[in-house]
């Protein structure tokens, strides 16, 4: 299970939040998340594919040239995992950093908790 959790953390970072193409992002969401997923962010709680897709797309639109870079190796514990990351222009210091914590059910993300260390500029 830990290999799957590591994969979900990395793919979520790149294929959901780092993806600028709406069609590819939606396909990744439907592959990686449970249909009844919940996403906990500093701005509030989102539920389901449509809300997650809109949130990730809107976030991506605010900084389309930023990349998400893991800042640690992912960690898995039972059905949960966490990954530290940074976001900013490629090759530069991150504009903001945070942690993703996921809860996995049936090998898909059932819940994502997004912790920010610093807010986007």
Image: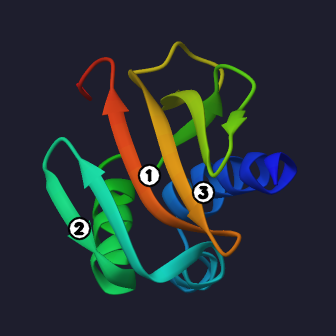
- Could you classify mark 2 by the number of other residues whose Cα lies within 10 Å: few (under 14), some (14-19), or many (20 or more)? some
User: In the rendered view, does 121 fall on the left or right side of 11?
Assistant: left
Closer to viewer: mark 2 or mark 1: 2
* Label 1 element class: loop
Please tell me the numbered disc located at residue 64: 1
Please tell me the numbered disc located at residue 12: 3
Residue 89 x/y as whole percent? 52, 30
Query: Residue visible at 39% across and 21% down?
Result: 95
Whole-Å distance between the Cαs marked 1 and 3? 17 Å
Query: Residue visible at 49% across and 56% down?
Result: 17
Closer to viewer: mark 2 or mark 3: 2
Residue 21 x/y as whole percent? 55, 74
Q: Which residue is mark 2?
A: 46
The quadrant the N terminus occupies is: bottom right
- Disc 2 vs disc 3: Cβ atoms closer than 8 Å? no
- Could you classify mark 3 by the number of other residues whose Cα lies within 10 Å: few (under 14), some (14-19), or many (20 or more)? many
Residue that extends furthest to the top in the rendered view of this protein: 93
* Label 3 element class: helix
Closer to viewer: mark 1 or mark 3: 3
User: Does residue 44 lie above or below 81 as drawn?
Assistant: below
Choose top left, top right, bottom left or bottom right for residue 121. top left
């Amino acid at each position: 299970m830990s290999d799957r959790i590591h994969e979900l953390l990395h793919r979520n970072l790149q294929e959901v939040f780092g993806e600028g193409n709406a069609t590819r992002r939606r396909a990744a969401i439907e592959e990686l998340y449970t249909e009844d997923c919940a996403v906990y962010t500093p701005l509030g709680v989102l539920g389901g594919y449509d809300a997650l897709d809109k949130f990730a797309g809107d976030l991506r639109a605010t900084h389309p040239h930023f990349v998400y870079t893991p800042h640690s190796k992912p960690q898995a514990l039972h059905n949960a995992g966490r990954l530290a990351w940074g976001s900013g222009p490629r090759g530069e210091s991150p504009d903001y950093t945070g942690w993703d914590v996921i809860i996995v059910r049936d090998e898909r993300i059932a819940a994502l908790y997004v912790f920010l260390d610093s807010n986007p500029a």
